[in-house]
Image: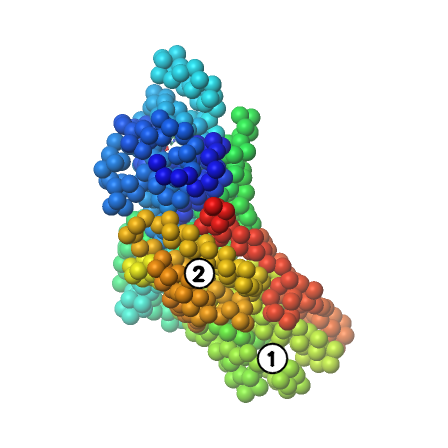
Amino acid sequence: MSEPLLPIQKPKMKLAVLTSGGDSAGMNAVVRAVVKTAIAKGCEAWVVREGYEGLVRGNAHDTQEVQDARASEDATFVNNLRFGDGELLKDGTGDYISGRTLRGRYIVRVGWDDVRGWFGEGGTLIGTARSTTFRTKEGRQTAAYNMIKEGIDALVVCGGDGSLTGADVFRSEWPQHVAALKADGQITEEQAIAHQHLRIVGLVGSIDNDMSMTDMTIGAPTALHRICESIDNINSTAYSHSRAFVLEVMGRHCGWLALMAGVSCGADFIFIPENPPAEEKWEDHMCKMIQSNREIGQRKTIVIVAEGAIDRNLNPIRADYIKDVLTDRLGLDTRVTTLGHTQRGGAPCAYDRIMPTLQGIEAVEALLQATPDTPSFMIGVSENKIIRVPLMEAVAMTRSVGVAISEKNFDKAMSLRDPEFAEMLDGFHATSILEKEPKLPQHQRMRVGIMHVGAPAGGMNAATRTAVRYCLRQGHVPYAIHNGFLGLLDDNVHQLSWLGVDTWMTRGGSELGTNRKLPDIDLGAVAAKFQQYNFQALLMIGGFETFNALLILDNARKHYPAFHIPMVHLPATISNNVPMTEFSLGSDTSLNALVSACDAIKQSASASRNRVFVVETQGGKCGYIATMGALATGAVILYTPERGIDLDMLRRDVKFLKRRYTLDQAGKAEGRLVLRNECASDVYSTDFIRRMLKEEGGSLFDSRSASLGHTLQGGIPSPMDRTRAVRLALNSMAYMERHHIELLQQQSKVKQAPPESAAVVTIQGTKVKWVPVQEMVAHADMKNRRGTEAWWDEYTTLVEELVGRQQLLERV
Ligand code: ATP
C-alpha cells in the first residue's frame, strides 16, 4: 500500500449517494459534488449503482482492495482514496459499469478522481432504476443489511418524489431493520450499536420541475433547453410551409416545461394540467385565437401540449386530437411532434452544473449535522439560494397539486405552484394573441420609445418583442429607436408591429442595433427628439452604459421637461455587472456558450499531451462569468478582477498544478482549465500565464491559451434569458404605464415625474424589484463599472475546494 497523502484519521462518516427514478441532467454533478465534499470533509464516499435496486442487490464479493482495507487500518484506505484509487476506474477501461471488478458489486467505494469530468455528461453515470423489491419491507431490510455490511449509515438520494418517499420510509423503519438483522444474527451487536440510525438527505432530480418548496428541480433547465432547441428547429420548417405544429412535451402533473417552452419559443397556444382551458368548448376558443394570428399574416402556428394536459372535466387533451381540430376546422397543414426522451438527454446546461453542485455540497453538510431527532431534509433552491426543507413536507405538498387537479380545484393547483408560474402564464397570454380591442382607453395610451444601449446580449430581442406585444395589446404605440442615442439624433426611429417582432424570441444580437454613445453627446438635441416623437415612456435595454444613460437623463430632468416621462433600464449584458440585480439578460446565454466552448477545449486538452488551457473570458472588471464558468466547467484555477493576480498566487498555482499532475495515473492524459477574466491583471496577461505554466510544467504538463472573446455573446439566447426577458419586459411596461397614468393625473401643465419613475428593473432572489436610478448610484462602483457587492464572490473559494487545492498544497 502506498504512502498516505495526509495524516491518517478515522473517517467522520461513511456516506453513499444514489440516483433513482427517471434520470435527469445534473445528477452527475450531484454525485461529483457529494463525493468530493465528503472526501474533503474527512468522510468515506460510496456510490450505489442502479438506485435502490443496487442497495438491495448489494455486493456479492469484495474486491482485493476492499479486502485489504478491511484487514488493515481503514483510515489509511480513506486517505489513499483522497486523490484517486477508487474502485470505479480499477479495471483501467474507464467503463466501470460493465467493468470486471464491479460485476456483482453495487455499493462501490469511490475516490476523488473517479468523478472527474462528470459535469459534461447527461443522465446518471452510476445508473438508476425503478426497484419493485425496495418497495417491500423485506427488500428494504436487505438494503439495510447491505449498507451496514459496508459500514454505511448515511445516504444521499437524488430522485423524484417517489424516490424521496422511499428514502423517508427507509429511514423511519431503519431501527426495526437493525433489530431484526441482529435478532437473525446477520449483524453483530457492535454493528447494531454503531448503526442505530440512518441519516438521509434528498435532492430532487426531475425534469418536470414538479416538486414543491423548491424553485427548480435538477434537470428541468436542461430539459427546457432540449425542448427549445427542438421548437426553434421546427419553427423554420413550420414557417417555410406555413404549417401548424403540435408538440407534446413531458409533464404528467406539471405544466412547467410546456409553459416555459411556450413563453421562450413564442408559441401560439399551450395546454397544461394546472390550468385547463376556461371554455367548455375550448376547441372553438383555440381556433378563434389561432385564426386571429393567421389573419394578421402569421405563417406558422405552434401549439405546445403537456403530456398530462386535461380539460375542465379532466378528460385528457391529446396532441393528435388538437391536430385534427386544426386540420378540420382551420384547414391548416398540421403535424404532431412528440419530443419524448430527447428531452431528458444531452449535456447539462450551465444551471444544471452549478446548482446541483451547490446542492450536493449542502447535502453532505446536512448529513454531517443530522441527529436522530432532526427530520430528513430535502435540499432545494429558493430565491437562488440553497435551502433545506423538511423532505416529507415537500413531498406532501407536491402530491397535493395532483389531488387539487383531480378534484377540479384548478385555482388551488395554481396557487400551489410558485408565484413566478402564474406570472409566466399571464406573460404568455399577453404576448401570444393580439386581441381586436386594445385594453386601455385612448387617453391612457402612450407612445413608447424602445432602444438598445451598449453591447448586444442574449434576450435583448426577446425583451423587445415582449414590450412591443404588450404595448399593442394595451393600445400603446411602440417605436424602435435604432442604433441607440446616435440613431435617435439621426431620426432612425420606426413604429414596430406585432408580426414584425414575431421571430425575435430566438434571435441573438440586437435587432434594433446598439450603440455605446450616451445621451450627453447632445442632451438638448436628445430632448428635442423626445419632443418631436412625443415619447411618453422610454425603455432602454442594455448594460452598465444604460444605467449611466438613465442617470444622465434623470439628472437632466431639471433642465428638460421632455425627460419628465417614465424611463426604465432593463439590464442586459453578458458581464452581469449592473449593480443590485442578480441577473442581467444575456448572462445565462453567455455562461452556456462558455460551458460549450470549455467542454470542447477540455476534450482537446485531454486528447493531446497533459495540457493546461488558459481560457480568457470577457466580463470587463466583473468576474461573474469567469467565476460561474469555473464552477460550471470544473476549472482548476480562476483569476478575477475583484481578486486580481499577484506573484504569490502564481507561485502557489504552479505548485498546485505540479502536485496535481504528479498524482495523475500514469499514461492517462488529463486536460485542465484555468479561467482568466480579461481584466484580472494588467501585468499578468493570459499569454504570460500560458508561457509561465509551459515553462514550469516541464515534462509534467504543457500549456496553451484560448480567448473566448465575442463568442460569449452566444448565438441563440438560452431559454432562461428568454423567460427572464419576458418577465422583466412585462414588469417594465406595467411600471411605466402606472407612472404615466399618475402623471396624467397631475393638474399642472408642466408635468413633474417623480424620481422613482426613472428606475432600473432588477431581479433579487426570485422577485422583481424596482430601484430608482439615483438610489442605485450608492451601490455602484462607477470606476470599475460594477456593483459594490458581488453575490457570487463566495463561489471563488468553492472553485478551489472542488479541486482539492488546499489538501494538495498541504501535502508534505
Ligand atoms: P420520477 O419523477 O422520474 O418518476 P420518482 O423518484 O418519482 O422519479 P418512482 O418510480 O416513483 O420515481 O420511484 C423510484 C423508486 O423509489 C421506486 O422504484 C421504488 O424503488 C422507490 N419508491 C418509490 N416510492 C416508494 C415507497 N412508497 N416506498 C418505498 N420505496 C419507494
Circle 1 sits on which residue?
518
Question: Which residue corresponds to mark 2?
Answer: 674
Residue at 73%, 81% in the rendered image = 559
Q: Camera-side residue: 556 or 707?
A: 707
Quadrant the N terminus occupies:
top left
- As shown in the figure, which amino acid type bears the numbered disc 2? Val
Residue at the extreme top of the image, as rendered: 183
Q: Position of residue 350 (x, y in %)?
A: 43, 56
Q: Visible in this render: residue 630? A: no
Q: Nearer the viewer, residue 195 or 774?
A: 195
793 is higher (above) or lower (below) than 396: below
Beta carbon at label 2 within 8 Å of ligand 1? no
Q: Secondary structure at mark 1?
A: loop
Where residue 448 sits, quadrant-wise, is: bottom right
Q: Is residue 103 left or right of residue 670?
A: left
Any mark on residue 363, and which?
none
Q: Kindly report the distance in space between the C-alpha atoms of the residues bearing marks 1 and 2.
A: 36 Å
| Label 1 crowd (10 A; few <14 / some 14-19 / many >=20) | many
Q: Could you tell me residue 85's position as x and y percent? A: 34, 41
Ligand 1 neighbours mark 1 (CB distance < 8 Å): no
**767 left or right of 742?**
left
Residue 500 visible at all: yes
- Residue found at x 48% / y 24%: 197
